[in-house]
Amino acid sequence: MTIDSLQTALSAQGYIADRQLVVSLFVALELGRPLFLEGEAGVGKTALARALAGAIGADLIRLQCYEGLDVNHAVYEWDYGRQLLEIRLREASGATDRASLRHAIFSEAFLLKRPLLQAIEPGQRPVVLLIDEIDRADEEFEAFLLEVLSDFQITIPEIGTISAVRRPSVILTSNRTRELHDALKRRCLFHWIGHPALEREIEIVLLRVPGIPERLAAQAATFVRGLRGIDLAKPPGVAETIDWVRALTTLGRAELDDASVDTTLGSVIKYREDAERVRAFGIDQLVEAARARAG
């Protein structure tokens, strides 16, 4: 695979990436290193992992991070209900040998495999492991992740060590709600994904919402670009632009007008305070500027 063919394959999956991002992804794949993506919400970090999986014919395994995430939910845990049932069945049948019982209930048949273990298990197809919003996880889990990303192996005391025969392609994402440790970043290649240029955002909208009027796509992207120039708590990303255009299309709109923008503002702005700022700034001004620039 070349950089050009990777970019073409991503485009075929509906993901339009700039050259720098494709180069970063290509190098990460070639070196077998995780790619760490930072950027505002809605700029396409998670979507890149999905597109990559489709582009290289891999299975996508996603670990959604959150506060309190622990090994049981990220790696594995035992199916205690089935283990207890097995113990009772063996006791009822008179099979009470403790060694054989322990060997039976602590086997793979009773193991609940979570995303990290699933990702390193041998399989027929390659794997893209998406560790999404790692900044939401606790520092303790972040420290545990260092070992996994270094060795790509997991030790289960009752079974042994499971090592990846073929390492997964790993993408980590962060919305930068907190700083991550340098030790984690050193194990990864880094790329910042910002909001795309206007022309590229229009191109993305036209690709993701087939059949919409090009004028509407241009006006909507220009309007959202104007929103990003206002002091908002949560500026809208490309994902919000796409959702908004779909909402406008559902209402039969072919171009922006003040009334339709006001009634669908919740598709692109997700905080009450931000909506109030936009209305105070002037929806009519933003619409007029978007219509003028888009032509």
Image (cartoon, grey):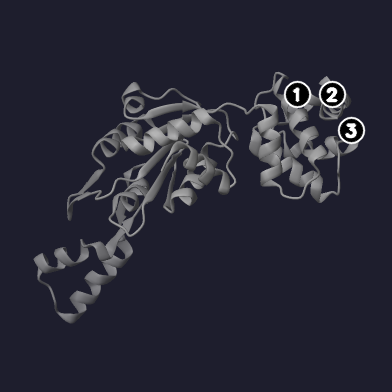
Measure the alpha-carbon separation of dots 3 and 2.
12 Å
Please give the name of the residue rendered at 37% of the width and 48% of the height, measured from the top-left corner.
73
Residue 175 visible in the shown view: no
Q: What is the three-letter code of the residue carrying label 3? A: Asp
**Mark 3 touches mark 1? (CB < 8 Å):** no
For the residue labelled by badge 3, is the local secondary structure a helix, a strand or a loop?
helix
Marker disc for residue 226: 1
Quarter of the image with the N terminus is top left
Please give the name of the residue rendered at 37% of the width and 43% of the height, measured from the top-left corner.
169
Give the number of the mark in front: 3 or 2. Answer: 2
Indicate the quadrant where residue 67 lies. top left
Residue 209 visible in the shown view: yes
Quarter of the image with the C terminus is top right
Measure the alpha-carbon separation of dots 2 and 1.
8 Å
Expressed as whole percent of the image width and height from the top left, the position of residue 211 reads 76, 50
Please give the name of the residue rendered at 46% of the width and 24% of the height, measured from the top-left corner.
178
**Mark 2 touches mark 1? (CB < 8 Å):** yes
For the residue labelled by badge 2, is the local secondary structure a helix, a strand or a loop?
helix
Marker disc for residue 117: none
Looking at marks 2 and 1 on the same chain, the residue that comes earlier in the sequence is marked by: 1
Q: What is the three-letter code of the residue carrying label 2? A: Ala
Marker disc for residue 258: 3
**Residue under pointer 2:** 289
Callout 3 crowding tier (Cα within 10 Å): few <14, some 14–19, many ≥20 = some
Give the number of the mark in front: 3 or 1. Answer: 1
**Mark 3 touches mark 2? (CB < 8 Å):** no
